[in-house]
Amino acid sequence: MKHIVLLGLLTIVGCAQAPTQSTADTSGSRNEATYRAQIHTELAAHYFTRGQYTVAFAEVKEALASEPDHAPAYNVRALVHAKLHEDRQAEESFRRSMELGPNFSEVRNNFGYYLCQRKRFEEGLPLFDEALKNPLYASPEKAIANAGLCALHKGDAALAESTLQRALARARNQPAALLGMAELEMGRRNPVAARSYLKRLADQNEFKPQALWLGVRVSRAQGDRENEASYGAQLRRDFPESQEVRLLLEGQYDKMGTMP
């Protein structure tokens, strides 16, 4: 699932007024350092998405060597630590990134999601609101959808529905919002509506373990044994170590999957 956006790169803005020679030299050096930090941070994000965490850490190190206060680099470092279950280091990097980037929405979205995954809902939900305060945030629908998923896993169905529908109003096929609405409809014992959201999710090629597990449950509720078996086989094949496979093997068909 592409619910988490890795970067919100800082824009290099030139001076409106021609500086003195010494200031220009300093400014040019600073802009060059920022550019190098951006490039290494983008590389770090690329390696992170490929699961090459050692290389990602090395690129973050290079980014911070160029610009020690580069907020997006700390954001990527936090994501790598989180993936490795190094929670203390992850939180330190998330908080450092927020401190350095007061208008850096992506780190607030990512940290909020991280906290909600760990069931720290009361801490995570306000961070999505903080992310949305920036009018220049390029992808607000992602933070809105993540807030909806967070509310869903917290057990606040009313807040979850209103928030997820806000995300879908901005982006009709936002994957996290589709998954959340499908889960809401399953909670209402309405597999027909759940399947309609699931189909739209499938069209986005977003079949991660949570969506496959949802497919198992929707198909089972509709008596579609063939599709139930197909979803289950794909889930076991592609995500054998997932929590969703454990739920499948234990027959806990009333349980949602993990927060993606």
Image (cartoon, helix red, strand yellow):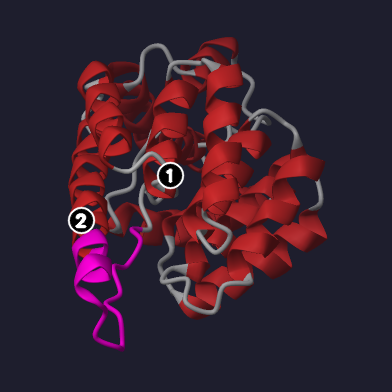
Range covered by the magenta-colored residues: 9-27
Specify the amino acid type for callout 1: Asp
> Considering the image in quadrants, where does the N terminus appear?
top left
- Residue matched to label 2: 29
Q: Crowding near pointer 2: few (<14 within 10 Å), some, many (20+)?
A: few
Which of labels 2 and 1 is toward the front? 2
Which of the 4 quarters of the picture holds residue 241?
top left
Residue situated in front as seen by the camera: 82 or 245: 82
Residue 105 located left or right of residue 25: right
**Residue 134 lies within the magenta run:** no
At horizontal 21% and vertical 30% (from top left) the residue drawn is 50
At horizontal 44% and vertical 47% (from top left) the residue drawn is 71
Measuring from the top left, give residue 140's x and y in whole percent: 51, 69
- Residues tagged 2 and 1 counted as in contact (Cβ below 8 A): no
Measuring from the top left, give residue 139's x and y in whole percent: 43, 68
Measuring from the top left, give residue 247's x and y in whole percent: 57, 18
Name the residue furthest bottom: 17
Which of the 4 quarters of the picture holds residue 217?
top right
Residue 38 visible in image: yes
Q: Main secondary structure of the magenta part?
A: loop
Q: Residue 69: which numbered mark, if any?
A: 1
Q: Crowding near pointer 1: few (<14 within 10 Å), some, many (20+)?
A: some
Residue 142 located left or right of residue 9: right
Residue 188 visible in image: no
Specify the amino acid type for callout 2: Ser
At horizontal 36% and vertical 13% (from top left) the residue drawn is 240
Residue 2 located left or right of residue 143: left
At horizontal 51% and vertical 51% (from top left) the residue drawn is 179
Above or below residue 105? Residue 257 is: above
Above or below residue 164? Residue 80 is: above
Q: Secondary structure at mark 2?
A: helix
Measuring from the top left, give residue 64's x and y in whole percent: 33, 35
